[in-house]
Image (cartoon, rainbow, N blue to C red):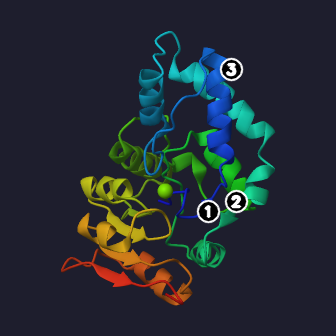
Amino acid sequence: MWDIDYTLLRGGGVASSAWKAAFTEVTGVPWQDTPIFGGRTDTDICAEVFASHGVTDCTPERFFARYVEVVHENRHEFAVQGALMPGVREVLTRLGDDPGVVQTLVTGNVPQVAAAKVAAFGLEGTFDAEVGGYGTDDSVRATLVRRSLERAEAKYGERFLPVVVGDTVYDVTAALANGAVAIAVATGATPADALAAAGAHVVLGDLSDLETTVRVLTAATPPASRSIEVPAAGA
Ligand SMILES: [Mg+2]
């Protein structure tokens, strides 16, 4: 269960620009202040933005519909303004060759924006997006992990050991709330020690050490004793 932003890639501000433009188009209210997006679900952020701007006559559904359109219009900008995080393509490719692994997305993004981001980097065939968890499923990130697991078990008819990979404390706590393995990667704004303190089973500096990353992600059970920190290559 891959988080997208600052785990797989950075979008270069394309989605947040689209968010602000769509907000003013749909509500007529000028954009005032930007909340902290990292690790949160779009439903959660939307509720805060509506409240902080005094918007009471719009629904998240109406806003998301226009937001998705604006992202779609600007989707070519993701690969121009943004980038994949180190080692991501190699790790995804290796895991894609493992018949025992199903890779999907568990992200606070709405599904269409999640799809646009990964497609911008040619990764659309990598994930079974049908069994993902998305920011429109719930405002609470732990529910996204649960929904993804339910979708995967319904589609494949088997039990999975869920492994959540993310860059924020929200990813870690969402994994732990579901009994999932929590793999944190310190390629976002959250430092490695904070990810370890949140209870991540493993904290990676980044995903550039292919063998270590694949070994950690495919370990059968969470290393229960204490968290392990692997610094980024070159750190
Ligand atoms: Mg993230």
Residue flagged by tag 2: what amino acid is it? Gly
> Looking at the rendering, which quadrant does residue 62 occupy?
top right
Query: Residue farthest to the left?
Result: 225
Mark 3 residue crowding within 10 angstroms, few (<14) / some (14–19) / many (20+): some
Residue 214, image x, y percentages: 49, 81
Query: Residue farthest to the top?
Result: 57
Mark 3 residue's CB less than 8 Å from ligand 1: no
Residue 180, image x, y percentages: 32, 62
Q: Is residue 161 left or right of residue 4?
A: left
Q: Which residue is mark 3?
A: 25
Q: Which residue is mark 1?
A: 9
Q: Is residue 27 left or right of residue 199?
A: right
Disc ID at residue 41:
none
Asked if disc 3 and disc 1 are in contact, CB closer than 8 Å, the reply is no
Mark 1 residue's CB less than 8 Å from ligand 1: no
Rounded to the nearest angstrom, the CA distance separating label 3 from label 2 is: 25 Å
Pick the residue in front: 13 or 214: 13
Residue 128, image x, y percentages: 59, 55
| Secondary structure type for disc 2 | loop
Residue flagged by tag 3: what amino acid is it? Glu
Asked if disc 2 and disc 1 are in contact, CB closer than 8 Å, the reply is yes
Mark 2 residue crowding within 10 angstroms, few (<14) / some (14–19) / many (20+): some
Q: Is residue 234 visible?
A: yes
Q: Which residue is mark 2?
A: 82
Mark 1 residue crowding within 10 angstroms, few (<14) / some (14–19) / many (20+): many
